[in-house]
Amino acid sequence: MPDPPAKPKVALYWCASCGGCEEAVVDLAEGVLSVLNAVDIVFWPVAMDFKRRDVEALADGAIRAALLNGAIRTSEQEEMARLLRRKSQVVVAFGACAQLGGVPSLANQFDREQILDYIYAQSPTVVNDQGARPVSAYREGDRVATLPEFWRTTRALDQVIEVDYYVPGCPPTPKLLGQALATLLSDELPPKGTVLAPDTALCEECPRKDSKPEDLSVKTFKRPHLTPMDAALCFLAQGIVCMGPATRSGCEGLCIQGAMPCTGCFGPTSRVRDQGAKALSALASSVEGKEDREIESALAGIPDPVGTFYRYGLAKSLLRGKVGHLCSDRPESIKTGSMESRL
Amino acid sequence: MGLAKGSPRTGFYICHCGTNIADTVDVDAVRRHAEELPGVVVSCDYKYMCSDPGQELIIQDIKEHRLERVVVAACSPLLHEATFRGAVERGGLNPFLFHMVNIREQDAWVHEDRAQATRKARDLIRAAIRRVAYHRPLERMRVGVNPNTLIIGGGIAGINAALNLSMAGKRVYLVEREPTIGGHMAKYDKTFPTLDCAACILTPKMSAVRDSRNIVLWTYSEVEKIDGYIGNFRVQVRRKPRYVDEETCVGCMQCVDACIYKDARFPSEFELGLKKRKPVYMPFPQAVPPVVAIDPKTCLHFKTGKCKEPCKEACARDSIRFDQREVVEEIEVGQIIVATGFQTFDPARLPQYGYGEFPNVYTSLEIERLVNASGPTGGQVLLRNGQVPQSVGILHCVGSRDENTNRWCSTVCCMTALKLAHLVKEHTGATVYSFYIDMRCTGKGYEEFYDRMMREGVQFVRGRVGEVRDWEMAPEEEGKLVLRVEDTLAGFVRRIPVDLVILAVGMEPRADAEAVQRMLHISRSNDGFFLERHPKLAPVETTTDGVYLAGCCQGPKDIPSAVAQGSAAAAHVLAMISKGHIELEPNTVAVLDDCSGCKTCIPLCPYHALTLNEESKKAQVNLALCKGCGTCAAACPSGSITQNLFEDEQIDAEIEETLAHV
Ligand SMILES: Cc1cc2nc3c(=O)[nH]c(=O)nc-3n(C[C@H](O)[C@H](O)[C@H](O)COP(=O)(O)OP(=O)(O)OC[C@H]3O[C@@H](n4cnc5c(N)ncnc54)[C@H](O)[C@@H]3O)c2cc1C
Ligand code: SF4
């Protein structure tokens, strides 16, 4: 049965992502049906059989809203992002990777060659006797097989195209998604650039908030999998790094309710430019020791600061990553050494 | 980062500072550069922007060109920010829509290359012009001033400040650690250079303190805790029990006479151990308050619980109170004067002078007691064996001007040494030698006093004494203390035998200076004395508003200077009380409604300005306490604290523009 023409067209697409954001849409459960009734989905490669040429065939601006998840790492992702931008009135960066670069942007600590080296040669589980490497075009006889280019860095969506709104989360909760769709389909759109979630930090809605002492005086940071945890006490009070104070609320403390600290996937509030730096300065000022030795031993509990404080936002951080500083003519040992210790 | 909001109409002014800036920075080039920048409608240079005509330029332009922002590139904001804000305000613009760029200390004075310095000036002023666009109008806050004053320390400096304030009808809490006020001066017989009797000039002032209705005198007490800020301090004072009712005791001394100890057995603190006292005692006859004290460490009642307590019986006014307890008084004051004085250098740290080893080596302070008519010997200067000394050596600079002890000159010990030379000579007729490095007699009438001593026949030897020993190398040295000294005028080493040695000990910060410093949030200079706000222009103020210094706690000085400082501090206090309120600069922080209540900021504030509002569960700031240091704003993990004049947009704009072409 053809949809009545009045229904707004919606596109969904994924770039460098794990697929979790797609799951979030499916997680709407019965809610999906009402969404499907309200809109006309014109593109959703995960769930429906559309082709790129279907999108190309649409008039520019024909799509009411395109929801893109995932970061931009390859030439194909960039092309699709640009195409959808052209065809859509509103583009939404959906989920942490599109909004902030996400976990894939942690790769910005290494340059492209280091990454390929590791994945195709050094990783302990790799068997690649021929030393094969991906190439962008491969010719056999008269057939040419192509692969997208693997760019030097991972970028958030708004570092590639103009983005109108953001839905945070890794992945966004069904509730936020539902609210976002309702907002996007309404007549009153929020100001461009709005993150469609509350603008306070997670502590505000945290069930453990009251148990947080005024003075943390952290002696050592502990890692969740290495320490018995109190089920009701603020994680920071237990010396476990929780990104809650530096992370936008709106998830309703899902991880906390699952007895795990916040890892920061909702990104910073609108007033903060660099979530990791903020979390770091807040936590660093809560360390009890003032001597170098005491500080070092406290920090020993955070073996991977970048992965801890910038897990979802390295691409959008002030420093953006380390690529460019780690030039490729560095001694091999340094390159692989740092790579090994981080992966 | 977004662009400046539509670029407000900005006036830019660059100062030559005579040649201070213009010599190194091409002022005209910078002015022309500014002209081209977005929003700049006036760009102007002038020889002295801080002069009246300079300020008038700004005032006129604001009116004529309807300026919305003003930027001045000149010297340090510390010097003239207030000046230019004043001009902006007089021009009719909110004074905080202004920004100052320091191109003198931070550019002209630290660079030599004119082209580079000019480029730097261009970068800095571009940044300021971009930044000032983000400034918002701010209002100063007013808070009332509590008219009561706390004075810590009842030496001559504290006494004088207290009397000045009480004369003006203001309430003073004078807190003194010892059982009596008076400080060091109460120990002296005569004061240089006039040789007037110390007691005759000091005790009337002490009595005036006792009699003043405006002065609450708490002796034997110490300040324990201070919270708050100028105009509104909350203070806790711990009053130690003296086991005597201060209200009823009149100092008749019946109890002292009656004490179970028939003889005085314990070293008197006031007499520096040169005399003994009983467990119940009065430090000295003119003590204020004239109230005895019982020392629980020596009193039999406290030591054994088995004393017939004849003191109690002897007291006609029932003033002995063995059950007295320590009391903590809580008071509120608007301002605080610190007058905790000094301590003398302990010469045991210089074993070569034999203090503590040879009984006839004394400190100058001890000799002050010996020459004192009411002192332990009734004014006789005697050797420990009771004989009158025939010869006396006075050593200057003991524990002063010496890398191994204290590097500073204690300023009064030359004069003290001369005074004691005179007094000892007068009392004993002995030959007096004075061993000095340089004679420092710089006060009014001081050099004349030195002249007089030369005429009186004091033997001056220029040289630092190497050691004081008791072994003789010649018959005339037998039984004497021999001073070995290089006489730098004569050019050879001399051995001078004397009967008595006086060490003119220097002045040091009190042993508890650090604790007092912390309690008051003030600073100390390298020598350990409390630090004044400005060494020339603010010698009694401190970096903490509402806290002032008087007397030797700020550095060695003589009585006239200590008195003058006491009065100066009182004048500051009175000025603030008459004004009635303080204006707080609005460079404070604000906690936004978006605060999540994570409490990160609360323990970080060095001024305790942040608390958690129990109802809203959000942080709140006490603006009167906030000094705008920005610690909390930097640490707030959700960016919910903003700092006036240092908002993210302002700083970002400034950084971006400064680095624009790097
Ligand atoms: C041997 C000697 C002789 C001198 N002779 C002369 C002279 O003839 N003429 C002259 O002009 N100058 C003379 N001076 C200098 C003179 O002593 C000082 O200038 C003067 O005493 C300084 O007074 P002050 O009030 O600052 O300090 P102080 O006299 O030291 O008084 C400070 C008071 O504060 C009290 N106090 C300290 N800490 C605390 C605390 N934490 N809480 C409560 N109370 C506290 C002390 O008990 C003391 O009573 C002489 C100095 C010396 C060492
Ligand atoms: S005043 Fe005289 S004795 Fe005292 S330290 Fe200075 S020079 Fe030495």
Image: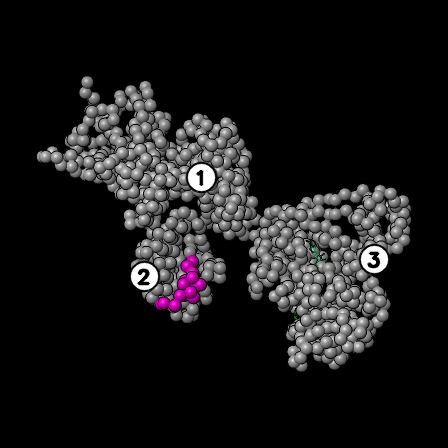
Side of A237 relative to B362 (left or right)? left
Residue farthest toward the left in the current orientation of the protein: A142
Marks 1 and 3 close (CB-CB < 8 Å): no
Viewer-side label of 1, 3: 1
Looking at the rendered structure, the secondary structure element under dot 2 is helix
The residue that appears at 48% across and 50% down in the rendered structure is B587
Instruction: Please say if A288 is above or below B381.
Output: above
Instruction: Please say if A12 is above or below B165.
Output: above
Q: What residue type is labelled 3?
A: Lys
Q: Distance between the residues labelled 2 and 1?
A: 49 Å
Residue at image mark 3 = B276
Viewer-side label of 2, 1: 1
Q: How far apart are marks 1 and 3 (CA)?
A: 65 Å
Q: Quadrant of ligand 2?
A: bottom right
Looking at the rendered structure, the secondary structure element under dot 3 is strand
Magenta stretch bounds: B100-114
The residue that appears at 68% across and 49% down in the rendered structure is B223
Residue at image mark 1 = A302
Q: Given the image, what chain letter belongs to the residue carrying mark 3? A: B
